[in-house]
Every structure is written in structure tokens, then in C-alpha cells.
Image: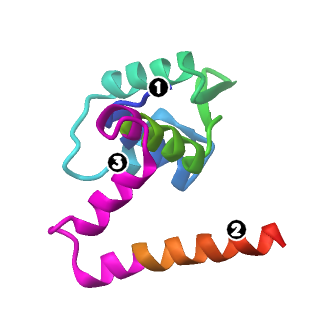
Amino acid sequence: MKLSGAEWQIMNALWRKHPATARQIAGRLPDEINWAYTTIKTMLARLVDKKALGESKQGNTSVYTPLISRQKARQRALRQLMDQAFDGAFGPLMHFLVEEHSLNDQQRQEIIEALNRNISDCKEQDI
């Protein structure tokens, strides 16, 4: 499942607090997003079709709940990026991130520390 930028906005609003109605979701979107209510409802319907959201009824009102976790969605998005931009290889992606000039020293260090923790965890599991 691939989420568009607009769908990420909707999902982020729901991951913060769910379940939620379309109006509640609209109220959680960033101020710079001025979508019409009908646009939000259309995107919610698409996310239900994609099985990213579940929809239930409370009277005449639809209530939405995420069916995919933020972590799983991020994993899928990262996998798609790796496949498209880095020929499916993790190493070149990490090299790119560490060498990226728009990252500050602290952000680079956080990446390196996360990799080191992961390496340590893997070594411990091999014991």
C-alpha cells in the first residue's frame, strides 16, 4: 500500500488519536491545510478502500480507526524508497543519509548511534 502525501496527513491525524470522525480529523490537520470537508471524506473513503482504515457507524456518522500502524506504514514507505531510489539496497541509503549535507552533526550522530545499537542488538542475539 502506497500512501500519498495527503493520505499521510490524514493518517497522522488518526494515529495521534483514534477512533475519530471526519470532522475530528479535519480539526487535527495542520492549519495550512484548508481542505473542504468533502475532500477529507473522499480521502477517508480511499484509505478505507486501501484497507489502511476501518470504518464503523455510530448512528449516521462514520468513525475511522487505523488498520495499519505508523511503524508498518513507515517500513513500507522506506522499502518503496529503497527499491526506487537505491536499487533495494540499504547500505547506499544509509551512506546517503550520513553524508547528506542538510543534516546537522547531531542528526548524523543519532543515525550512527542507532546503527551501533542495532549492531549490538544483533550480536547479542547471535550469542
What segment carries the magenta color?
A: 82-110
Q: Which mark is residue 94?
A: none
Res. 25 image quadrant: top left
Q: Left of 89 or right of it: where is 50?
A: right
Quadrant containing the C terminus is bottom right
Q: Secondary structure at mark 2?
A: helix
For the residue carrying disc 1, how many other residues have a C-alpha within 10 Å: few (<14), some (14-19), or many (20+)? many
Image position, residue 78 (x, y; %) = 44, 44
The tag earlier along the polypeptide, 2 or 1, is 1
How far apart are the alpha carbons under marks 2 and 3? 39 Å
Identity of the amino acid at label 2? Cys
The tag earlier along the polypeptide, 1 or 3, is 3
Q: Is residue 102 above or below residue 112?
A: above
Count of picture labels: 3
Q: What residue appears at the point 41 percent right and 78 percent down from the top-left corner?
A: 110
Q: What residue appears at the point 44 percent right and 39 percent down from the top-left corner?
A: 77
Work out which residue is located at the far top of the displayed protein and give it: 49
Res. 85 image quadrant: top left
Q: What residue appears at the point 63 percent right and 43 percent down from the top-left corner?
A: 19
How far apart are the alpha carbons under marks 2 and 1? 39 Å
Q: Which mark is residue 122?
A: 2
Q: Secondary structure at mark 3?
A: loop
How far apart are the alpha carbons under marks 1 and 3? 13 Å
